[in-house]
Image: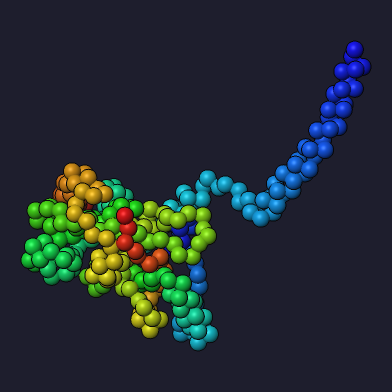
């Protein structure tokens, strides 16, 4: 009985192998070809972190001390607008009429324009810096490089950047309540810095005398 | 600036040396031809920092320490 079963199994394997072997061989060839075609780059978990560290160093070397401290402590940078009638806006009613305005730059978020005096939000400007020279490891710039790119483009040629960006009403990408809160944090932060500066200035003569 | 890489040194040299300047001009053109924007970080007399966008090598101040190339801006979502 056992002998009969073994013999049957052997026959079955022999018959199946005619079907299976070519398929297995083909699958193995495909697998090897795939490995040859796409070189496997080992995953490097520290690459993005190192890129961000380099980007922070570069940003630090370009912006002033106040802007750097603002970015480090608040997470955004304010850049003053320079157009006499506010940022480019097809709606004449939205012109600022000479009132001072500024932009908040967040990493990988829209640039927000607002009136400096009243904190009224003017517009959101959605802008990206896509890499045209792929392939690279990531399609996004490190956070601090994105901020620096916006800072350079805004301070270097505000009109060009704003006209390139997609303009939206406030609230499309950034919660207006959050932006208002950030503006409040910024004003508190500036007051604290002014207090510190005044305190250190007044204590200097004492230090030299003592 | 390169996505996933951060700052990458492309070329360096002294513009007062003809050979270096030629190499820097060639590299500058190559970057702009690849579609990148170029900016020079500056500090004015009052200590205010800003950038100057440059479209040709002649626009780069002779005393500039560096030119930063970054991807061209496009409308985002």
Who is closer to the viewer here, A5 or A194?
A5
Residue ID at (83%, 27%): A12
Residue ID at (15%, 61%): A101
Instruction: Give the left or right position of residue A78, taking residue B77 as reference.
Output: left
Outermost bottom residue: B18
Vertical arrangement, residue B17 with respect to residue A21, above or below: below
Question: Tag count in the figure?
Answer: 0
Residue A102 can be seen in this image: yes
Who is closer to the viewer here, A150 or A160?
A160
Outermost top residue: A1
Residue A95 can be seen in this image: no
Question: In the figure, residue A152 lies in which quadrant?
Answer: bottom left
Vertical arrangement, residue A53 with respect to residue A131, above or below: above
Vertical arrangement, residue A132 with respect to residue A72, above or below: below
Residue ID at (51%, 47%): A46
Instruction: Give the left or right position of residue A192, taking residue A51 as reference.
Output: left
Q: Position of residue A177 (x, y in %)?
A: 18, 43
Q: Position of residue A73 (x, y in %)?
A: 29, 47
Q: Position of residue A59 (x, y in %)?
A: 36, 59
């Amino acid at each position: 009985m056992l002998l009969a079963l073994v013999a049957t199994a052997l026959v079955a394997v022999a018959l199946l192998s005619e079907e299976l072997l070519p398929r297995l061989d083909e699958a193995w060839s495909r697998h090897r070809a795939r490995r040859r075609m796409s070189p496997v780059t080992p995953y490097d978990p520290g690459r993005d972190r190192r890129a961000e560290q380099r980007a922070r160093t570069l940003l630090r070397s370009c912006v002033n001390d106040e802007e750097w401290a603002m970015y480090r402590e608040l997470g955004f940078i304010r850049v003053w607008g320079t157009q006499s009638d506010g940022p480019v806006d097809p709606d004449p009613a939205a012109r600022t009429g000479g009132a001072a305005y500024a932009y908040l730059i967040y990493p990988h978020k829209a640039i927000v324009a607002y009136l400096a005096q009243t904190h009224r939000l003017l517009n959101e400007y959605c802008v990206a810096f896509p890499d045209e020279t792929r392939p690279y490891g990531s399609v996004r710039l490190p956070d601090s490089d994105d901020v620096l790119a916006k800072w350079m483009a805004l301070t270097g040629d505000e009109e060009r950047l704003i006209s390139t960006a997609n303009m939206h009403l406030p609230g499309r990408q950034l919660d207006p309540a959050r932006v208002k809160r950030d503006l409040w944090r910024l004003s508190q932060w500036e007051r604290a810095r002014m207090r510190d500066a005044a305190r250190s200035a007044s204590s200097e003569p004492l230090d030299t005398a003592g | 600036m390169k996505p996933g890489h951060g700052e990458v040194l492309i070329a360096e040299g002294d513009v007062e040396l003809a050979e270096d300047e030629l190499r820097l001009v060639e590299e500058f053109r190559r970057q702009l031809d690849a579609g990148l924007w170029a900016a020079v970080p500056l500090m004015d007399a009052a200590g205010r920092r800003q950038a100057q966008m440059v479209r040709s090598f002649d626009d780069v101040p002779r005393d500039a320490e560096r030119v930063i190339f970054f991807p061209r801006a496009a409308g985002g979502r």
